[in-house]
Image (cartoon, rainbow, N blue to C red):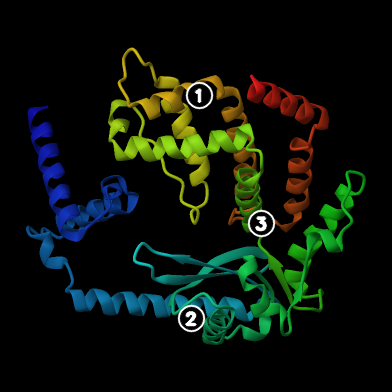
Amino acid sequence: MHQYRKNGQKVVELLCHLSAELNLSFKASTSDSMKHFIDEIFKISENSNIRNPSKLFPSRQTLSSSIQKEGNKRRELLKNKFQSANAICISLDHWQDPNRVYFLGICVHYFHEEEYKTHLLAIREVRNKTSEATKQDLKSVLIDYGIEDKVFFILSDGALRSAFTKEKFTEMSVERYFNFTSENQEEAIISLHSITEETLLTNNYRKQVWMHCSAHRLQLVLQHGFKDLQTLKPQNTISTILTYVKRLVQSLIKTNSQRKFKKTVKQECATRWDTLLEMIVSVIETTNEYNPDIINVNDLEHTILMYLKMNMKLLKTIRSIIEMFVTERLTLSVDGSPTLSRVLTSRHFLLQELKVNEEEINENFQNEQKRTIL
């Protein structure tokens, strides 16, 4: 046991040194790839009676050229698979790293021997996110793989609509193609399912289509919905709660009072999905933990925490609403199969769950007025 602890400590020291020198994530210590690498090196050195396995490590130049060769080999394998596909779907999106460098990610979806396949086609550093630049970047990737004439369906966020609909692509709207009601839900879903599967196999749709990603649309509904709430006059309880939640998080971080709580509060970032939910969840935990007799905070933080305690039911309701959107978005974001047929189901579910109760709204509004007068 003593020897095991001694060796374990040595491994910790080596990983600390490796993380610091190579700027590795702490997740490297639990990575399956890292464990597999160490196990394989141990097996090779043991089977070959090599006392110094580090001699097996390639130089930087050798590693770089080997990655290039492996990439080219896999590219050729993909090209061969694409030859048998009658039609191909493309999904793409931009993002920005902490250094403000833009990247474009492109995924491909198709059927190979009647089996659905999806692959990451390319990640490109790009000059900007304009429609014209994106169209050219995508075109160069498609030409490189020899599939430019096979793409019939492109899925992206709304910012790229003009890049494709100005020319040969027709915009497809789920609402426009199907008059969806609870009565014809099954028929609409079957129709959409046939588009996502039969057309990929046979290309019978006979037109090139661009579609606004439903996951992005759900995120936009959340963003604009809460933004609109906070601009309403007079200010409502929901907007007041959200304002206080943000002010509390900012203050706890600025004064370093968050160290007095078990959980760290999370800040919202407008460009990152789910950060509003993460912030609200962390504030709920912090508010539930707060006890003024035990935890000492400044007057502003104390006032907000006590206000949130009194309105905890509404705060949890806000959390539940956001969680519904996140759950539905994740349902539409899986890689294993086409999910276009689920869009109408998700839309119907959210409309039913979030149906406005006019009587309840009027009652709450009257109560708000009474509280304001008092």
Tell me the SS state at disc 2.
helix
Answer with the quarter of the image where residue 198 lies.
bottom right
Which of 323 and 255 lies nearest the eye of the viewer? 255
| Residue at mark 2 | 76
Which of disc 2 and disc 1 is earlier in sequence? 2
Q: Position of residue 164 (x, y in %)?
A: 67, 79
Tell me the SS state at disc 3.
helix
Q: Determine the residue positioned at 20% across, 79% down.
A: 61
Q: Determine the residue positioned at 56% across, 87% down.
A: 143
Q: Position of residue 192 (x, y in %)?
A: 80, 59
Q: Is residue 102 left or right of residue 224?
A: left
| Residue at mark 1 | 307
Tell me the SS state at disc 1.
helix
Q: Position of residue 163 (x, y in %)?
A: 64, 79
**What is the CA distance from the residue labelled 1 to the residue labelled 3?**
33 Å
The crowd level at tag 1 (other Cα within 10 Å; few <14, some 14-19, many 20+) is some
> Is residue 111 visible in this depiction of the protein?
no
Which of 216 and 64 lies nearest the eye of the viewer? 216
| Residue at mark 3 | 217
Which of disc 3 and disc 1 is earlier in sequence? 3
Q: Is residue 71 left or right of residue 48?
A: right
Which of disc 3 and disc 2 is earlier in sequence? 2
Answer with the quarter of the image where residue 153 lies.
bottom right
Answer with the quarter of the image where residue 322 lies.
top right
In the image, what residue type sits under mark 2?
Answer: Glu
Mark 1 or mark 3: which is in front? 1
Mark 1 or mark 2: which is in front? 1
Q: Determine the residue positioned at 13% across, 52% down.
A: 17
Q: Determine the residue positioned at 62% across, 84% down.
A: 148
**Label at residue 255:** none
The crowd level at tag 3 (other Cα within 10 Å; few <14, some 14-19, many 20+) is some
Tag 1–tag 3 contact (CB < 8 Å) = no
